[in-house]
Image (cartoon, grey):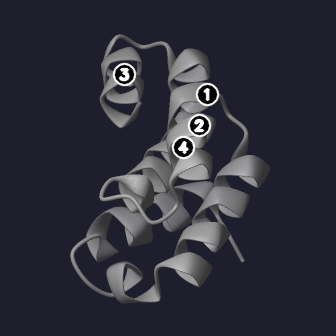
C-alpha cells in the first residue's frame, strides 16, 4: 500500500496516493512503513492544499512515532511542518 501510494504520488495524483497512505497506516500502524505513510499522507495533503489535514497527519506522526520525528525522518517531518505552517 505504501509503494502504491508513492507511485500515485510520484505520478502527481496526490488524492489517490493519500488513500493508500492512510490505508497503510490504519491497517498496520506498527508496520515498517507506517511512519513513512503518515509523512507522505501529510505531503499528499499539502499537494492538495489541505494544510489542516496535513497538520493532523503530522501531529499523529509525532505522537505515535516520537523517536522517528527526532531521528531518521526528522528532516522530512520538519520540512512538512514548516510548509504546512503547523502550530
As drawn, the label of residue 23 is 2
Could you tell me residue 70's position as x and y percent?
34, 87
Q: CA distance from mark 2 to mark 3?
A: 11 Å
As drawn, the label of residue 41 is 4
Mark 3: secondary structure: helix
- Of circles 3 and 4, the one toward us is 3
Check whether the beta carbons of the residues at disc 3 and disc 1 lie within 8 A of each other. no
Query: If the image is split into quadrants, where does the N terminus sit?
Result: top left
Q: On the picture, is 11 further left or further right than 28?
A: left
- Of circles 4 and 1, the one toward us is 1
As drawn, the label of residue 19 is 1
- Of circles 1 and 2, the one toward us is 2
Badge 3, how many Cα within 10 Å: few under 14, some, many 20+?
A: some
Query: If the image is split into quadrants, where does the C terminus sit?
Result: bottom right
**Which residue in the protein does label 3 denote?**
4
Badge 2, how many Cα within 10 Å: few under 14, some, many 20+?
A: some
Please report the residue visible at 64 percent of the width from the left and 28 percent of the height from the top. Answer: 48
**First reached walking from the N terminus: tag 2 or tag 4:** 2
**First reached walking from the N terminus: tag 2 or tag 3:** 3
- Of circles 2 and 4, the one toward us is 2
Q: CA distance from mark 1 to mark 2?
A: 6 Å
Can you tell which quarter of the image residue 8 is in?
top left
Viewer-proximal residue among 51 and 24: 24
Could you tell me residue 27's position as x and y percent?
57, 46
Count of numbered circles in the view: 4
Please report the residue visible at 59 percent of the width from the left and 65 percent of the height from the top. Answer: 58
Q: CA distance from mark 2 to mark 4?
A: 10 Å
**First reached walking from the N terminus: tag 4 or tag 1:** 1
Viewer-proximal residue among 23 and 37: 23
Amino acid at each position: 500500500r505504501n509503494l502504491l501510494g508513492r507511485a500515485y504520488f510520484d505520478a502527481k495524483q496526490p488524492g489517490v496516493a493519500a488513500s493508500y497512505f492512510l490505508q497503510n497506516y490504519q491497517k498496520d500502524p506498527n508496520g515498517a512503513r507506517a511512519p513513512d505513510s503518515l509523512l507522505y499522507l501529510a505531503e499528499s495533503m499539502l499537494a492538495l492544499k489541505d494544510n489542516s489535514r496535513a497538520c493532523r497527519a503530522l501531529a499523529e506522526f509525532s505522537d505515535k512515532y516520537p523517536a522517528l520525528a527526532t531521528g531518521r525522518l526528522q528532516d522530512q517531518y520538519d520540512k512538512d511542518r514548516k510548509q504546512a505552517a503547523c502550530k
